[in-house]
Image: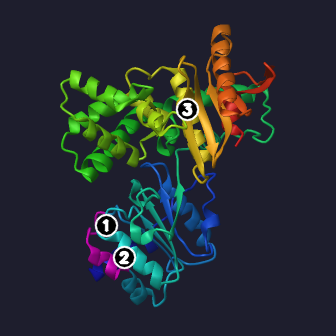
Amino acid sequence: MNDTIKTIIYSWLDKKLPTIIPRDIPIEQYLDIKPRKIIAITGFRRVGKTYLLFHLLQKLLQKSDREQEIYINFDDERIPEQTEFLTELFPSILQTFKKNPKHVFLDEIQDMPKWSKWLRRVYDNEEYDLFITGSSSKVSSREIPTELRGRCLELQVFPLSFKEFLRFKNIEINFDKLKYSEYEKVKVSRNLNEYLIFGGMPEVVLAEEEKKIEILQQYYGTVVRRDIVERFKVKNEEGLKAMMRLLLNSKQYSISRLYNTLKSLNYEIGKTTILHYLQYVENSYFMYSIPIFSYKIKDNLQYPRKAYFIDNGFITSISTRHSKDLGRFYENSVAIEILRRNAQKDTEIYYWSDRKGKEVDFVIKEGLQINKLIQVCYDIGDFDTKKREIEALLKASKDLKCNNLIVITNNYDAVEEIKKQKIQFISLHNWLLSS
């Protein structure tokens, strides 16, 4: 085992770090924090967690050396999935370099046996900073093992924001003023369309257009197989895939509706199993469920939930019903951006609906206070559509006692006063770039 560890360590010493395009993720602020914490970097597969570590390592290596900044990738096939590897790891590092590291980066550690107990022992007995990553919720605040609670801080990574997308495309825009020349407007509009259709997965953004769908479908297959079927030992794989296709082709779902539809398609899946499958899909970071806002717990449980997916590219590459639905693309991109902006906050996200069918897409609740209502409407130029969307927003504003009202549109930016309420209309690209 010691020889294997030394091989892995020396591979790190010889590894050439790739060229990094910086992200707007403040990982440096987690260095040397007091009190000391294990930093758990979580998120969907291939969103850039490893490159985020590499970017931080590049900065650390300007002042330190590789013997003190250790990176281990547990997806390396040479690493046996055995507790003994973990047990012997740091003694072998000390034996090899005659000194302890300053920072240790453990990439995709969640599948190692007893990893959390080992990490707790290392945290309690050593002084170096520990960064871990994981593509499943095993290392997230939702599922963090008991022995690590209170010792971890989670930093969730999402696909590229639109601002990061433009940086990856090497497009320079004055983000501060959000006032563009005609040439810049054309560039922003063209790139927004690509962002909405193919999403913000870093590798997909940099790929040739004819390869994008293929890469996204490969990602989808890997997530279904490794992060759901294999991890949770799903026996009815075809039933799971059928359920996921239904979700991708629907804007909202309920357990009963999924059950009845799957039954009509001759899939024998009980309601309890469907509930478990939904949890598995969310635990892989592939989907987020948004419940209805209600002060009654019964309503939260009974009413349908809205389904949003980690990246628009999966709607394009997997969905058969919404692959050309710009309204769906707009709403899904807004949902993921809201989740990104509020990932580190005490924020809850809902939708609102009344008995007459009026609906508001997003209710943002911070602590006990509802502080924002957001409506997403691609074509606000249609009189009847605008009237419908505004009536729902004003009704929700009255019921929820919230006056911060926003309508995200295709290309309309203004503040209007309607029935003594100020409503901000903002085009999607300006809203995405305003953070």
Residue type beneath disc 1: Met
Q: Position of residue 314 (x, y in %)?
A: 42, 34
* In front of the other: 119 or 194: 119
Label 1 neighbour load within 10 Å: few <14, some 14-19, many 20+: some
Q: Quadrant of residue 12?
A: bottom left
Among numbered discs 3 and 1, the one appearing first in the sequence: 1
Residue drawn 33% across and 76% down? 86
Among numbered discs 1 and 2, the one appearing first in the sequence: 1
Q: Which residue is mark 1?
A: 112
Q: CA distance from mark 3 to mark 1?
A: 39 Å
Q: Is residue 409 visible?
A: no
Q: CA distance from mark 1 to mark 2?
A: 10 Å
Residue type beneath disc 3: Tyr
Q: Is residue 84 magenta?
A: yes
Q: Quadrant of residue 375?
A: top right
Disc number lying in front (1 or 2): 2
Q: How is the image coloured?
A: rainbow
Q: Which residue is mark 2?
A: 118
Query: Which stretch did the figure color magenta?
Result: 77-89
In this rendering, position of residue 300 left or right of residue 233: right
* In front of the other: 370 or 44: 370
The label number, if any, that marks residue 351 in the structure image: 3
